[in-house]
Image (cartoon, grey):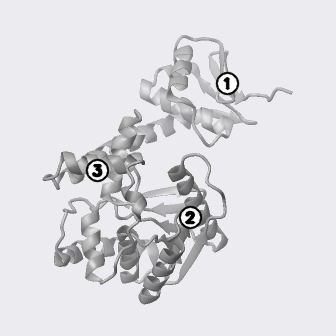
């Protein structure tokens, strides 16, 4: 499923309808085979996605997550239910029961996806549509740039990805929010405005405000950045494929991975990094990767032919010109 390129920023309702035809022709082959789910908060982006799925005759259920963070959230979920009845689309409200811990926005995202994924699994739904759009993609680029992310982070969100066995599809990544707003307006639906999106206590909101102030007359900038991200994504895919091919040369036996030391050192530094990262994640079984600086330090040891090191719960040992990686035994 390739991104839709060349979608311009339009505010005219008629033009928006024409552009959305591209999306409608993009969806049916993925959504008519079996029931899919779509996350609908009631915002302009998720309403546009629900309208598009309805227009392409998808067998779809709309899922709204009520995080319970604002007094208005229950009423907003009822408004979404009313809109979905108008579209004749089944609708379910999923309510978060857990208490807030740590970063509120990160907590909300974790709880939201946990409920969405759990619902899909319980109802044997294999595909979940979410409504991230071009503006979200560009904001993600700058947030990851600030964190010092590598190629994968700067490539942004992918149109198709997997999460706990559920396929996540983001078909709106090429569409500016203004285009989606015009499309929703043409269907006479009033999107729900979440005041949290205006709260500058959150970094993403501050970034959005800064970009609007810095580039008030450059409507083409987000599309250009999104295009650059597509180029980065292509480079990322090439490196990932090459790393996967190199990783396939490793021998796995009884939870231990073994690789030829000379073959590993013959790889480009980028591929060495990716292969070692994959090995550490596979052997350790941990969902989160080790810190980049720790991987780089381990690579330095391997390049210097040091005999052993431990990282991310994995023991690495150089024996008979081969590196062997095994899970670190827990101390009693």
User: Residue at position x 16%, y 52% from top?
Assistant: 216
Q: Quadrant of the C terminus?
A: top right
Q: Residues within 10 Å of mark 3 (few under 14, many from 20)?
A: few
Point out residue 165 in the picture as x, y percentages from the top left corner.
60, 59
Tag 2 or tag 3, which sits nearer the N-term? 2
User: Residue at position x 49%, y 38% from top?
Assistant: 245
Q: Is residue 331 left or right of residue 14?
A: right
Q: Residues within 10 Å of mark 2 (few under 14, many from 20)?
A: many
Q: 83 and 298: which one is in front?
A: 83
Q: Which mark is residue 191?
A: none
Q: Is residue 324 left or right of residue 78?
A: right
Tag 1 or tag 2, which sits nearer the N-term? 2
Point out residue 295 in the picture as x, y percentages from the top left corner.
54, 25
- Residue furthest to the left: 217
Q: Can residue 31 be seen here? A: yes
Q: Can residue 233 be seen here? A: no
Foreground label between 1 and 3: 3
Local secondary structure at mark 3: helix
Q: Is residue 58 left or right of residue 281?
A: left
Tag 3 or tag 1, which sits nearer the N-term? 3
Q: 304 and 183: which one is in front?
A: 183
Label 1 vs label 3: CA separation?
A: 50 Å
Q: Which residue is mark 3?
A: 209
- Residue furthest to the front: 71
Q: Residues within 10 Å of mark 1 (few under 14, many from 20)?
A: many
Point out residue 265 in the picture as x, y percentages from the top left corner.
50, 20
Q: Which residue is mark 1?
A: 324
Q: 142 and 270: which one is in front?
A: 142
Q: Which residue is mark 2?
A: 67
């Amino acid at each position: 499923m390739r991104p839709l390129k060349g979608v311009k920023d339009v505010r005219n309702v008629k033009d928006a309808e024409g552009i959305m035809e591209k999306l409608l022709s993009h969806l049916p082959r993925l959504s008519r085979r079996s029931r899919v789910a779509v996350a609908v908060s009631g915002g302009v982006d998720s309403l546009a996605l629900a309208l598009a799925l309805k227009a392409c005759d998808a067998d779809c259920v709309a899922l709204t997550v009520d995080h319970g963070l604002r007094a208005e959230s229950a009423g907003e979920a009822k408004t979404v239910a009313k809109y979905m009845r108008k579209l004749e689309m089944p609708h379910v409200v999923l309510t978060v029961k857990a208490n807030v811990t740590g970063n509120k926005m990160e907590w909300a995202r974790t709880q939201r996806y946990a409920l969405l994924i759990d619902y899909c699994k319980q109802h044997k739904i294999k595909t979940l549509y979410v409504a991230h759009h071009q503006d979200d993609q560009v904001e993600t680029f700058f947030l990851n740039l600030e964190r010092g992310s590598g190629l994968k982070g700067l490539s942004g969100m992918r149109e198709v990805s997997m999460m706990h066995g559920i396929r996540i599809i983001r078909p709106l990544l090429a569409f500016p929010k203004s285009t989606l707003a015009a499309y929703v307006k043409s269907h006479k639906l009033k999107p729900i405005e979440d005041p949290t999106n205006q709260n500058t206590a959150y970094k993403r909101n501050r970034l959005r405000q800064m970009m609007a102030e810095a580039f008030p007359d450059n409507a083409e900038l987000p599309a250009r950045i999104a295009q650059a991200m597509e180029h980065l994504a292509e480079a990322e895919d090439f490196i990932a494929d090459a790393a996967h091919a190199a990783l396939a040369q490793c021998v796995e036996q009884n939870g231990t991975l073994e690789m030829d030391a000379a073959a590993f050192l013959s790889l480009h530094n980028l591929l060495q990094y990716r292969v070692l990262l994959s090995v550490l994640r596979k052997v350790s079984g941990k969902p989160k990767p080790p810190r980049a600086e720790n991987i780089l330090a381990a690579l330095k040891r391997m390049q210097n032919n040091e005999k052993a090191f431990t990282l991310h719960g994995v023991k690495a040992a150089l024996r008979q010109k081969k590196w062997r990686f095994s899970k670190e035994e827990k101390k009693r």
